[in-house]
Image (tube, rainbow, N blue to C red):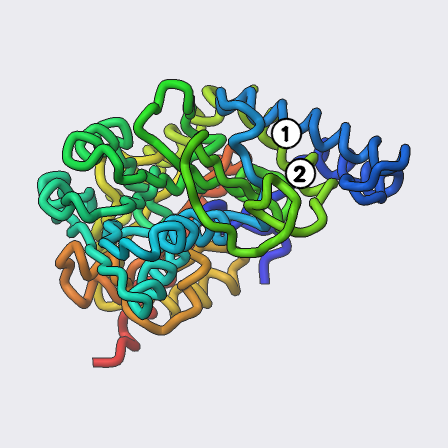
């Protein structure tokens, strides 16, 4: 096992900024009261939450009363989808998603089928992008919600959310549009004041070097959704004692990463380009599954005649961390539904891995990864189960 960690799994989770670790440590030490309590200690906690919430909302260009804190991206997606469905329970109707959604979106939608909601899935084109014409045909006057990822967690595909929102509202002005921005927030600038067609948007802290266990859902004013947990906190949309240090750590991480967003984007773009160019020089039989126009932070590649789980384990033994897709589904032995939807050959689907970068990665890290792949892939391909 290599002593150094070569971490290329930043779409699953990221290291926490030192400044965030120090900040939340101080908060946990000194601000431990319930933010809903009316004594001086509770008021101090309320005020620090308010201050950090406002800072986060400034980044997103939204009013603080439209942001609900959750336990993470998965809960935010569940709240948006199930909350919309249960608020429209008497209407039933249909919900439209794409084939590259995160498991929390797909499984939330499937769960609603038992209550009589129809789930419609927009197909993918061969390059991994959503078929916008197909999406248009799926929406009708009974569609209550469309949910799409801003950036696909498996492929890195970037959705044109302005175009999608225009299509939705042109067909059905009453249909709500939810965007899963877990993989885009902190990496691509988001100005919700200019995205009038977006009704809800999900965020997660640990994808942007903040603490785990905290996320948020933007819910536009006058959008009606039902809570998953009943209580009185956060306007009744998300009950439970607020995670003070989590909220504050999330906001601090968001401030730091947005101050560096352009530099990070340019650096990571260069790293991804460097990897692709040098991978082509190895002579390995590979396929790039990620579309050309995609997030620089995510790259899905496939090796022919090799099992991804075998390659992942071999890379892990060499100190390299990658994944076979979204972390919420990568432990499943199932073949990627996203890659199947792209109609890829099975011998490539089974050998697909996801690299996800951050600004701390270096060209030297990538050189080590490429050298290791050159050594491992030819050996492992000999042991494929025919």
* Residue 46 percent coordinates (x, y): 76, 33
**Numbered circle sitting on residue 193:** none
Please say if 107 is above or below 127. below
Q: Quadrant of the C terminus?
A: bottom left
Q: Is residue 270 left or right of residue 47?
A: left
Quadrant of res 324: bottom left
Q: Which residue is mark 2?
A: 247
**Residue 183, can we see it?**
no
Q: Is 201 or 175 nearer to us in this picture?
A: 175
* Residue 85 percent coordinates (x, y): 36, 53
Please say if 256 is above or below 174. above
Q: Are marks 2 and 1 in contact (CB under 8 Å)?
A: yes
Q: Is 93 or 95 nearer to us in this picture?
A: 93
* Residue 40 percent coordinates (x, y): 90, 33
**Residue 123, can we see it?**
yes
As drawn, which residue projects farthest toward the bottom?
Answer: 386
Q: Which residue occupies 19% across, 37% down? A: 172
Q: Which residue occupies 36% across, 19% down? A: 194
Q: Is residue 154 left or right of residue 71?
A: left
Q: Residues within 10 Å of mark 1 (few under 14, many from 20)?
A: many
Q: Secondary structure at mark 1?
A: helix
Q: Which residue occupies 59% across, 57% down? A: 2
As drawn, which residue projects farthest toward the front?
Answer: 90
Q: Residues within 10 Å of mark 2 (few under 14, many from 20)?
A: many
Q: Using the numbered discs, state the Cα–Cα distance from disc 2 to disc 1 in whole angstroms.
A: 7 Å
Q: Is residue 272 left or right of residue 289?
A: right
Q: Which residue occupies 50% across, 62% down? A: 316
Q: Which residue is mark 1?
A: 53
Please say if 162 is above or below 236. above
Q: How many marks?
A: 2
């Amino acid at each position: 096992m290599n002593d150094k960690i070569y971490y290329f799994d930043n779409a699953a989770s990221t290291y926490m900024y030192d400044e965030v670790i120090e900040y939340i440590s101080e908060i946990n030490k000194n601000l431990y009261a319930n933010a809903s309590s009316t004594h001086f200690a509770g008021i101090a906690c309320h005020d620090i939450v308010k201050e950090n919430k406002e800072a986060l909302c400034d980044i997103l260009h939204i009013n603080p009363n439209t942001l609900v804190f959750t336990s993470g991206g998965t809960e935010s997606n569940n709240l948006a989808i199930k909350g919309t469905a249960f608020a429209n329970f008497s209407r039933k109707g249909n919900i439209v998603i794409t084939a590259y959604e995160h498991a929390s979106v797909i499984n939330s939608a499937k769960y609603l089928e038992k209550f009589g909601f129809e789930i419609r899935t927009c197909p993918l084109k061969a390059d991994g992008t959503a078929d916008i014409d197909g999406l248009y045909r799926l929406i009708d006057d009974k569609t209550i919600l469309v949910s799409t990822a801003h950036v696909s967690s498996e492929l890195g595909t970037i959705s044109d959310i302005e175009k999608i929102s225009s299509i939705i509202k042109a067909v059905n002005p009453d249909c709500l549009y939810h965007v899963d921005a877990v993989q885009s927030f902190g990496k691509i600038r988001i100005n919700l004041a200019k995205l009038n067609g977006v009704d809800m948007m999900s965020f997660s802290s640990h994808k942007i070097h903040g603490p785990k266990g905290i996320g948020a859902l933007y819910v536009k004013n006058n959008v009606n959704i039902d809570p998953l947990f009943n209580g009185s906190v956060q306007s009744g949309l998300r009950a439970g004692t607020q995670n003070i240090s989590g909220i504050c750590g999330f906001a601090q991480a968001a401030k730091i990463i947005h101050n560096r967003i352009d530099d990070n984007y340019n650096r990571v773009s260069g790293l991804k380009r460097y990897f692709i160019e040098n991978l082509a020089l190895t002579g390995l039989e590979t396929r790039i599954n990620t579309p050309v126009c995609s997030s620089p932070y995510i790259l899905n590649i496939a090796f022919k005649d090799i099992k991804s789980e075998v390659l992942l384990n071999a890379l892990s033994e060499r100190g390299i961390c990658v994944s076979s897709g979204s972390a919420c589904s990568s432990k499943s032995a199932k073949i990627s539904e996203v890659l199947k939807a792209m109609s890829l050959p099975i011998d490539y689907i089974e050998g697909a891995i996801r690299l996800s970068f951050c600004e701390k990665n270096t060209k030297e890290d990538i050189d080590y990864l490429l050298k290791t792949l050159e050594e491992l892939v030819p050996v492992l391909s000999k042991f494929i189960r025919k």
